[in-house]
Amino acid sequence: MNNKLETIPFTIIGPRVRKSPFFESTRKYGCKAYTVYNHMYMPLYYEDPVSDYWNLLEHVTVWDVACQRQMEITGPDAFRLSQYLTPRNLSKCEIGQCMYTSIVDENGCMLNDPVLIRLAENHFWFSLADSDILLWAKGIAHNMNLQVSISEPFVSPLAVQGPKAEVVMVDLFGDWIEQLRFFRSRETELNGIPLIVARTGWSKQDGFELYLRESRHGDELWEQIMAAGKPYNITPGAPSTIERIESGLLSYGADMDMTNNPFEIGLDKYVDLDQEADFIGKDALIKIRKEGVKQKLVGLELFTEPMMRNENRWTVIKDNKNCGTVRSATYSPRLKKNIALAMVPIEFADDGNKLNVETPSQFVEAEVVQMPFS
Ligand code: THG
């Protein structure tokens, strides 16, 4: 590929796509690229994707992930509806607990993979990936005649991620941060800014998400975290494509979509088909579990020089036949190899299987490897 011939397309910031309460801060701190997620601008990187990645691995980074919008469900039937929306067993979810869930349709196919927080017995936030689940939930609730209120409050997560996230958070909030377990949350405030702090986030480098309840404090919250993180080399950052592929964290729309079921993408352990409660897609998922899946999302190593372009959806080839698709790919600076997530037929999904991948510029040898990559 001749890089000189490439032009870099850009996106104009306009009023139709929403801005997060941290948007002005992200501009001020030099965000160089945004994408759109849940109809909102989301920062992609500041220095460059690789420098931002090292900042995440070695220090601590602050991410504007306000685009992980909340679907709030309250009212007497809030538990019933929330459980009906997901194959995860919510009777095991304590108040204050978070759960990684899937939302599937009647065929057991993925509509979203939110992180849920149970705020009270009948009060849930579904922190959504990039699809319009509020409409789906409203339709379901209306049809079932449930006594619920479903809305999108203007609550905005800000992530603090990296090995030094904990020390920054302790300096800001106190020692209780050390006791906050993975996927637990607590209501708190920071100098009068009401927040929910959870030990969650889309990286495996440890970290927290601060759910901002009052948008007008967005830039103030950002600045306070930046100030507290100064001794620890804090930098602005964003969800890192490189780190999340290394860690095997999935991206809705990239690695999976409405045509995939949770078993194909390795979310088996978040599906409870033996629970008593009914949920959308239960019969379909029971059938799929019985029959087995026909394809699977696997890790691939691609044997070629570092591939810096991240366009994916390349064709996987076996014996001159198309047999799957690369869904996400990146060069890993840490592992010094090209890694990818690819959907392949089940007969080629075992570790060690040799495949090929056709990118726009080359024909690459590849091998199925275990995830997380190492
Ligand atoms: N945080 C919050 N909301 C979100 C995301 C987030 N909504 C959209 C998107 N990210 C959802 N996707 C994921 C994917 C993986 C995880 C979280 C959100 C994750 N997985 C861990 C794992 O796979 O090891 C742990 C899951 C568990 O054990 O419960 O963290 O990042 N608020």
Image (cartoon, rainbow, N blue to C red):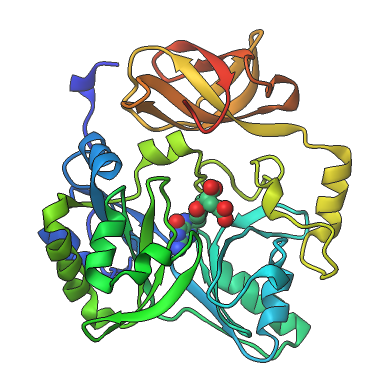
The spot of residue 294 in percent (x, y) is 77, 33
The spot of residue 337 in percent (x, y) is 39, 19
Q: Quadrant of the N terminus?
A: top left
The spot of residue 38 in percent (x, y) is 43, 63
Q: Which residue corresponds to the image point at 42% horizontal and 41% vertical from the top-left?
A: 244
* Residue 246, picture quadrant: top left
Q: Which residue corresponds to the image point at 34% horizontal and 13% vertical from the top-left?
A: 305
Compared across the picture, whether 316 is left or right of 159 comes to: right
Q: Nearer the viewer, residue 186 or 147?
A: 186
Q: Nearer the viewer, residue 119 or 74?
A: 119
> Does 364 appear above or below 55?
above
* Residue 338, picture quadrant: top left
Compared across the picture, whether 206 is left or right of 134 comes to: left
Q: Which residue corresponds to the image point at 89% horizontal and 43% vertical from the top-left?
A: 290
Compared across the picture, whether 97 is left or right of 41 comes to: right
Compared across the picture, whether 250 is left or right of 351 comes to: left
Count of numbered badges drawn on the protein: 0
Q: Which residue corresponds to the image point at 14% horizontal and 68% vertical from the top-left?
A: 223
> Does 373 appear above or below 90?
above
* Residue 65, picture quadrant: bottom left
> Does 299 appear above or below 125?
above
> Does 53 appear above or below 113?
above
Q: Is residue 11 visible?
A: no
